[in-house]
Structures are given as structure tokens and as C-alpha cells.
Amino acid sequence: MLSLHFTFVAILSSLVAASPAVDLVKRQSTDNIVYVTDQNNFCMIMPRDAHTDIGDSEYPGGMQTYCSPSGHYAGNQGTLPANFWSNVAFQSGTSSRGARYAQLTGCIRPSTLDRLNPGDGGGQYDSNGGDGGQGNPQGSKCLGYNFYVELVEPGDNRACIKCCDNYDDCPLNLDTSGCPAVIPGNYFNCG
């Protein structure tokens, strides 16, 4: 009887060890994902609630994906107004580090999206910052890339997002320095 018990325990242990549930990875929610294909097809993170400063949205559940009208692909994503950007530049290629990137830089009309406060100094969302380096929002990713960094600066009528394969191409340590310092590009003298 004792050997039957040990056999049962051994079989049960091997089943648990081989179970695919042990290797499951949390699937990303479509309201937590960004992407940049071009200036007309993209998704960015914005505050979930209306009239919220970027910094005040930085808590679990306080942020949500908002996409361009032609980039929107899931029901739990918000849609940015077609005139959200007053001027936007798309750029993609290979960085000086030899890694792919895609980015949007430019001027926004904060008053067209009720999630934003036009006078807000702004803040940063990213894939690897926040508590424990898990992203802000936590678990957020850029489709097709390893990392991303995004700044939304309503008070300066400016925003930027960059998706990168190399961590160093998406710096997280300049979050109070503004879009031009974090993501060099064309900002059309926003103001």
C-alpha cells in the first residue's frame, strides 16, 4: 500500500511539473498596449478618466490605450480625435546602436481629448519604469518592439512616443526633461 501511495505521488508530481499552466505568461490586455506604424496608425497611453493630469493617472487602472481612428482595433481602447495632432512627424529606422525603432513627435491639441487637462505639465508612460521596472502602466508593451517610452505634455501642446528594440534607445531617466530630450525629433515649435 505504501508503494502505491509513493507511485501515486510520483505520478501526480510529474503531471504538475509537466502542466502547461506552470509556464503560462500573463497575456497583455489590448487597453495596455501601444504601437506606432505610421502617423495615421498608432496607439498611445492616456489617462482613463476625464480631466486627469498625467501624473495623477499613474496608478493601476488609471491609464488606458487610446488609438488613432484608423489604428483602433479593440473595443476596450479609446479613440483619439482625428485632429488630436496639429503637426506630427513619423520616423523609423535603425538607431546608432544598430536596433530598430519607430516614433511619433509633434504638437497636440489637448482640448480635443477630454482625458487631458490642457494646463498639465505632463508625464511619462513606458514599458520598463514604474514600480519594480514593470512598466507604467504595469505590463504595458509596444507591439513588435521590446521597449517604449511616451511623454504627453498638454501644457506645452506636445507629445512623443518611441518604440525600440534596444533599451538604451528608449531612455527612462529623462522623464522630467521633456519630449525633445527624451525623443529627439521634429516638434514644429509647439506652443
Image: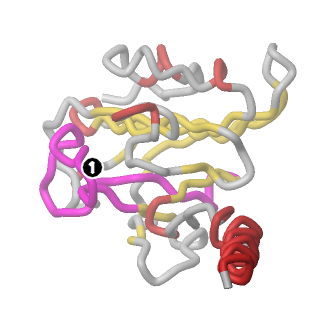
Query: Percent x, y for residue 7?
Result: 75, 77
Q: Does the magenta stretch include residue 26?
A: no
Q: Does the magenta stretch include residue 62?
A: yes
Does residue 134 lie above or below 52 as drawn? above
Query: Percent x, y for residue 92?
Result: 76, 37
User: For residue 155, what is the image quadrant?
Assistant: top left
Query: Percent x, y for residue 96?
Result: 81, 14
User: For residue 46, what is the image quadrant?
Assistant: bottom left
Residue drawn at 20 percent across, 37 percent down: 55
The three-letter code of the residue at mark 1 reads Pro
Observer-nearest of 21 and 146: 21
For this view, does 24 lie left or right of residue 132?
right
- Please give the range of residues in magenta: 38-64
Query: Percent x, y for residue 181?
Result: 47, 14
Which residue is denoted by mark 1 in the rendering?
Answer: 110
Observer-nearest of 91 and 28: 28
